[in-house]
Amino acid sequence: LHGKKKTLCTLTNEKNTFLCIAAKKNNQLFSVWSKLISLSTVITKKNFPDNKTVNKNILTDKILKDRICSFFYFSDIPIKDIEINTNNENYIALFKYEKNDNKFFITEEDESYGIIQLYKYLHEILNALEKGSVICIDNLDSGLHPVLMERLVYTFQMRKRNPYGAQLLFSTHDISLLRNDPQILRRDQIWFVERHSDLSSNLYSLAEFRRSRETDFAKIYMNGLVGGVPTLSDWE
């Protein structure tokens, strides 16, 4: 780095990343920052995909709908098709179940919370896989069975399913993913957040700890050996 870009290095500290500083100073590197932002999708409780938007996209994108139904079906969720009813700008999804000779529809109002969560996640996740972008999800385990969540994570690890290098960044309290299986998550992909007494937080990777004979990461975590576990006291 030379000139103005080199000056940015002196302004970078532990609390600010290099690209953040470049964006604030409107440097030439701002274009890099803008590109990263445009390729990122963040899902939290404040901007969770709403039913209407997802249903409208499903109505106009048959390929996306077929991919969602395929994921459902091969994840032991016998949803064969999704129909969208339109009425006065309302878009209501009907999930068609089909297994052997049993066929019936369930409206999104009557569908389970977990299925609706997965339905909305898949809409964004499949878009990320197609574009090779980054998708960030807060509390990915909300409403999802651990086996289904593992399948979502594994999909991003498979080159066949993720040819463009899309990335999934998520937070969770589900420790079922903390097993010693690099096909699901490597040590350097597992991070913990430790809250200190002054209410500040520290983010660190499992890879920073020495390997031990114990290979069950969930057991190591629950025993408090890597931190990030609440310290409980008696409650009366």
Image (tube, rainbow, N blue to C red):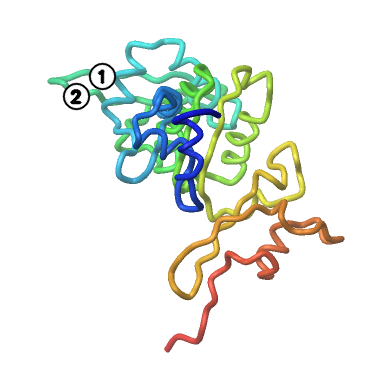
Question: Dot 2 lies on which element?
Answer: strand
2 or 1: mark nearer the eye: 2
Determine if residue 131 is in view.
yes
Q: Position of residue 84 (x, y in %)?
A: 30, 19
Count neighbours of disc 2 (C-alpha within 10 A) and say few if under 14, some if 14 to 19, many if 20 or more. Answer: few
Determine if residue 96 is in view.
no
- Relative to 218, does residue 62 appear above or below in the rendering? above
Q: Which mark is residue 96?
A: none
Question: Dot 1 lies on which element?
Answer: strand
Q: Position of residue 115 (x, y in %)?
A: 44, 37
Is residue 173 found left or right of 158 in the rendered image? left
User: At x 79% / y 58%, what residue is drawn?
Assistant: 210
Farthest residue, direction left: 88
| Label pair 2/1, CB-CB below 8 angstroms | yes
User: At x 46% / y 11%, what residue is drawn?
Assistant: 63
Q: Please state which amino acid type lies under the numbered disc 1.
A: Asn
Q: Position of residue 89 (x, y in %)?
A: 16, 21
> From the image, which quarter does the C terminus lie in?
bottom left
Image quadrant where residue 163 sits: top right
Q: CA distance from mark 2 to mark 1?
A: 8 Å
Foreground pick, 48 / 55? 48
Q: Position of residue 154 (x, y in %)?
A: 65, 33
Count neighbours of disc 1 (C-alpha within 10 A) and say few if under 14, some if 14 to 19, many if 20 or more. Answer: some
User: Disc count in the image?
Assistant: 2
Q: Which residue is mark 1?
A: 85
Q: Please state which amino acid type lies under the numbered disc 2.
A: Asn
Q: Which residue is mark 2?
A: 90
Is residue 138 found left or right of 50 in the rendered image? right
User: At x 75% / y 40%, what residue is drawn?
Assistant: 182
Foreground pick, 206 / 145? 206
**Is tag 2's residue or tag 1's residue first in the polypeptide sequence?**
1
